[in-house]
Image (spheres, rainbow, N blue to C red):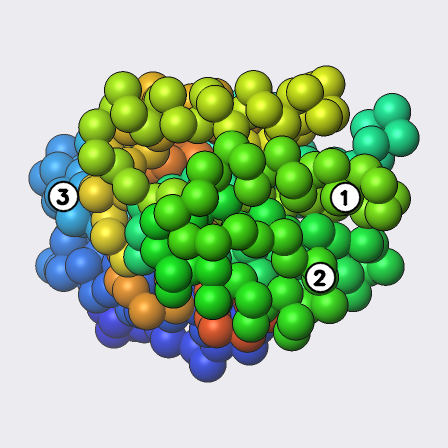
Amino acid sequence: MGLFNIFSKKEPKTDLERGLNKTKEGVFAKLARAVAGKSKVDDEVLDELEEVLISSDVGVDTTVRIIRRIEERVARDKYMNTSELQNILRDEITALLEERGETDAGFDTAKRNGYPFVVMVVGVNGVGKTTTIGKLAAQFHKAGKKVYIGAADTFRAAAIEQLEVWAERAGATLVKQNMGSDPASVAFDTLKSAVANEADIVLIDTAGRLHNKIGLMNELTKIRNVMAKVIPDAPHEVLLVLDGSTGQNAFEQAKQFTQATQVTSLAVTKLDGTAKGGVVIGISDQFKIPVRYIGVGEGIDQLQVFDRRAFVDSLFG
């Protein structure tokens, strides 16, 4: 059997497979080169595999854990054919991601003690934060939920304008103030209006500035404190949006924001336009914060609930 038949290409069938196709092709090409001329998985192949995973933006720490798992498997099985490497990788990465015991699911959007479910959305400018809010609003509205959006990124006129377009498209109600207004004031007004009108879900946009950690922390803390005056335990989720196409930079953004505020869930966007989809594996493993959603295309339905097993199967299926 020819070397490249081990990692044979198949036509993508689902949005997830299509969205991860560039990553899959990149990883498979590297894997094929790594095992060229080799018949068994030995130390040299494992060294090559380590380089493949790191260069695919899986991250150093997660890569080391994956390699250790495969080394243990090689030691246990004594002899392992390189033709099995694809399946081994799929199994070990899936097992690694499932060790945390969390189930894959989007948000539990049920009301909390009669109050709307509140999500504060954070992330730097350009990661797809506004688009993610719009797509979530559209999906929640389609599910029969009454959705309110708060335009608390008051430092960019474009952000407010984008949200206006998305809110109309999604069937959601937008609460906004003038550019330069106090973001906490917008969040407060949004929650007051949402409660008064018996909304189900509130999505609060925030400014995407990583000017410094102290400034960011103070701003986000103020927004949280003001929201809690209206709904005691709000926000119920803090969703950090990361751009998957930035690779290792997404790790750095995750570090910055998790230090600045209590991030409870992640969304990784723009995976369809990059070969760096391996970053989702590393982020999911390293930060111990659930990846709730991934973006695999421009369409509203292409912001998908992250299913770890389906994700790994689409890469190594």
Question: Neighbour class for label 2 at 10 Å: few (<14), some, many (≥20)?
Answer: many
Can residue 53 be seen?
A: no
Residue 78 on image: x %, y %: 31, 30
Q: What residue is at 48 percent from the left and 73 percent from the top?
A: 298
Residue 276 position in % (x across, y down): 27, 55
- Quarter where residue 190 is shown: top right
Give me the disc on residue 194: 1
The residue under the point 39% across, 27% down is 219
Q: Which mark is residue 51?
A: 3
Q: Residues within 10 Å of mark 3 (few under 14, many from 20)?
A: some
**Front tag of 2 and 3:** 2
Q: Is residue 28 left or right of residue 16?
A: left
Give the amino acid at mark 1: Ala
Q: Residue at x 53, y 62 (%)?
A: 163
Between marks 3 and 1 in the image, the one whose residue lies nearer the viewer: 1
Give whichever of discs 2 and 1 has the lower sequence position: 2
Please tell me how crowded label 1 is: few (under 14), some (14-19), or many (20+) other residues with Cα within 10 Å: many
Mark 3 or mark 2, which is nearer the start of the sequence? 3
Residue denoted by label 2: 172
